[in-house]
Image (cartoon, helix red, strand yellow):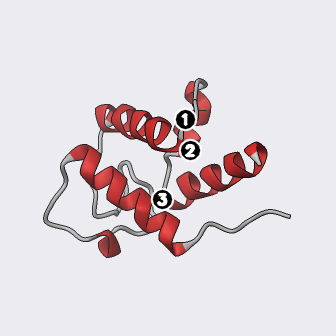
Amino acid sequence: MSQVPTVELKTEIKNLIMETLGISGITPDEIDDEEPLFGGGNALTLDSVDALEIIMAIQRKYKLRIADQNLARSVIKSINSIAEFLVTEQEKQS
């Protein structure tokens, strides 16, 4: 049975992104879970360098590896896609 990402996990991801990229001036609540993190209407204005930093931070914090570039691209589309990926990976490991 597939777990649903929690609000706490999504907030944790938002905080990780903000800490990793040194983003201030917005709160995690201002980051839309559905909106694309890149080139969208989200509160974050991110670029490709930010994408690499986010992937590395996720790998460090959650002790997993995202080796495939296409997978990495789809994982970091939005807060929801990151959360869903983490829940799926945690299920695989348990």
Give the CA distance from mark 1 to mark 3. 13 Å
- The answer to whether any part of residue 91 appears in the image is yes
Calculate the distance from the C-alpha at mark 1 to the C-alpha at mark 2.
5 Å
Which of the pair 86/42 is nearer the observer?
86
Identified by mark 3, the residue type is Ile
Residue 72 image offset from top left, x and y in percent: 54, 35
Residue at mark 1: 72
Given the image, on which type of amino acid does mark 1 rest? Ala
Determine whether the residue tagged by mark 1 lies in a helix, strand or loop.
helix
- Asked where in the image residue 80 lies, by quadrant, the reply is bottom right
Q: Are marks 1 and 2 in contact (CB under 8 Å)?
A: yes
Q: Residue 79 carries which label?
A: 3
Query: Regarding mark 3 in the picture, which secondary structure is present there?
Result: helix
Mark-to-mark CA distance, 2 and 3: 9 Å
Tell me the tag on residue 75. 2
- Residue 41 lies left or right of residue 84; in this view the side is left
